[in-house]
Amino acid sequence: MTQRRRTAVLPAAGAALLPAVALGVLLSLPAAAPAQPREASKKGAKTTSAVPREIQTKTLKNGLEIIVWPDHDISNVALYNWFRVGSRNERPGITGLSHFFEHMMFNGSEHHPPGSFDRVMEENGGSNNAFTSNDVTVYQDWFPRSALELIFQLESDRMCCLSFDSTVVESERGVVYSERRTSVDDDNAALLDEQVMATAYVAHPYQFPVIGWPSDIEHWTMADLKSYFRTYYAPNNATLILSGDVTPGEVFALAERYLGSIPAQPPPPPVATVEPPQMGERRLVVRKAGQVPLLEVSYHVGTPRDPDAEALDLLRTVLTTGESSRLYRRLVDQERAVVSVGSSVMEGFDPGLITFQATLNAGRDPADVERMLYQELERLAKSGVTEEELTKAKNIHLASYWQTLETINGKAAALGQYHVIRGDWRKLFDGPARYAAVRARDVQNVAKRIFDERNRTVGILLPLEERTTGGDAGAKAGGAR
């Protein structure tokens, strides 16, 4: 049986979505898909923003959206089933339920007992995975064309008739609790990130960890599970994407046959809470066993639907992508202050964060690293980026864009990301033009707006061995600019 590879319990890191077209999460998905990469066709290599005519869509009477992008170069298919549910839909007491259903959807339904979903799929040449984020839960299938109808049978059974066997529920509860210990509690970077998220958001449910708080994991009830599943895993809350060796007609027919009879449910309650503007710097210090200090700095930003979303992407690329990026040159090459430095941008339905993470060299003072980080951010906000930096950043995004669309997996994931998160899959094909239109002053204006000390949350993890200097480091960092 395939080992399930969980991928989305780190909200901030998981938000670094594809640089060129908000799809970075796609490039970091598990390499489980069988033989999807192909050589780019000559017609596919043309840089045009025209929407491919072969893409067709349909919405069933029960509200299920279906998007199909045929690609007959190989006899495989990629299927992504996007549910609009993540940790932002949870509340105290039931945090982590979206991620829990990521597990449960593979653990038994009316016609497929626990374990058979993976077994049947693998016997027919397929594989699968899933991920949960703050905003969505996505189930992925990769399979040969010959298994197309079988996959629709499997997907139908777990959407309409998921099993809630108490023994399986308790077993998976233990699995998730163990996963939390290994992926968060025992991972210093993940633990610091969780604490920064919980501090940066004081009102909005983005403050909840995707994997859930420990006490909530322990106390979900069967009533909680059934109510949550009925509300959020209905066809009218899902978008089904297929790319590969299929025709729209056969996909729509199979969808009608196997999914069309599943009843719609009342629309889920909207997330009405709006995070208020941050009015001052927030700081936290975590003291935990570890070898070196960690630093994480986050600033509130907008959504991927904002007009300056591409400028923000390019800003992040100039700062942290590659060894010629500004923060790498300053912190790693010149100062020898950190082992690594990176960044991520949350991209979801509501305003997110841009986050900078650094792993310090042993003996380096977090306050000094923090000061140097702010100097570089302020330099960019004051003086802007060079045309050479901007051109390089655009080239990186454009290359990533076309590399993603060379595979059926990339196509399916990209369509879903754009349709569900950005509101329209057609926007995918305007990506190159939107990035080309960004000017140096657009990037500078974004930096001026977001790199405000009142808009940032700072997290420092200090190894327990440095407890005697931890207070001084925190105090020094507090005054750094």
Image (tube, rainbow, N blue to C red):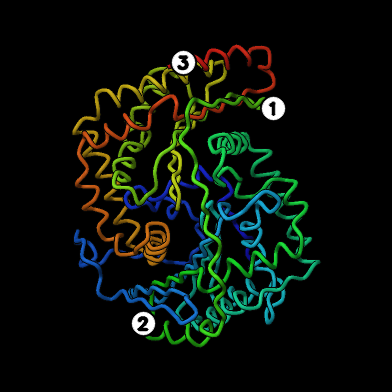
Tell me how far mark 3 sits from mark 2, CA to CA: 59 Å
Q: Earlier in the sequence, mark 3 or mark 2?
A: 2
| Cβ–Cβ under 8 Å for marks 3 and 2 | no
Q: Secondary structure at mark 1?
A: loop
Residue in the foreground of this view, choosing between 142 and 161: 161
Amino acid bearing label 3: Ala
Amino acid bearing label 1: Ala
Q: Position of residue 395 (x, y in %)?
A: 25, 45
Residue in the foreground of this view, choosing between 372 and 194: 194
Left or right placement of residue 83 versus residue 115 in this view:
left
In the rendered image, the vertical position of residue 367 relative to residue 62, given as above or below? above
* Neighbour tally class for label 3: few under 14, some 14-19, many 20 plus, Cα within 10 Å: some
**Residue on which the image places disc 3:** 480
Left or right placement of residue 457 versus residue 244 in this view:
right
Residue in the foreground of this view, choosing between 223 and 120: 223
Give the residue drawn at x 41%, y 49%: 17
The numbered mark at residue 289 is: 1
Amino acid bearing label 2: Thr
Give the residue drawn at x 38%, y 67%: 408
The image quadrant that residue 35 belongs to is: bottom left
The numbered mark at residue 247 is: 2
Give the residue drawn at x 24%, y 33%: 389
| Cβ–Cβ under 8 Å for marks 1 and 2 | no
In the rendered image, the vertical position of residue 434 relative to residue 373, given as above or below? below
Tell me how far mark 1 sits from mark 2, CA to CA: 55 Å
Closer to viewer: mark 3 or mark 1? 3
In the rendered image, the vertical position of residue 470 relative to residue 128, given as above or below? above
Q: Earlier in the sequence, mark 3 or mark 1?
A: 1
Q: Secondary structure at mark 2?
A: loop
Tell me how far mark 3 sits from mark 1, CA to CA: 25 Å
Q: Secondary structure at mark 3?
A: loop
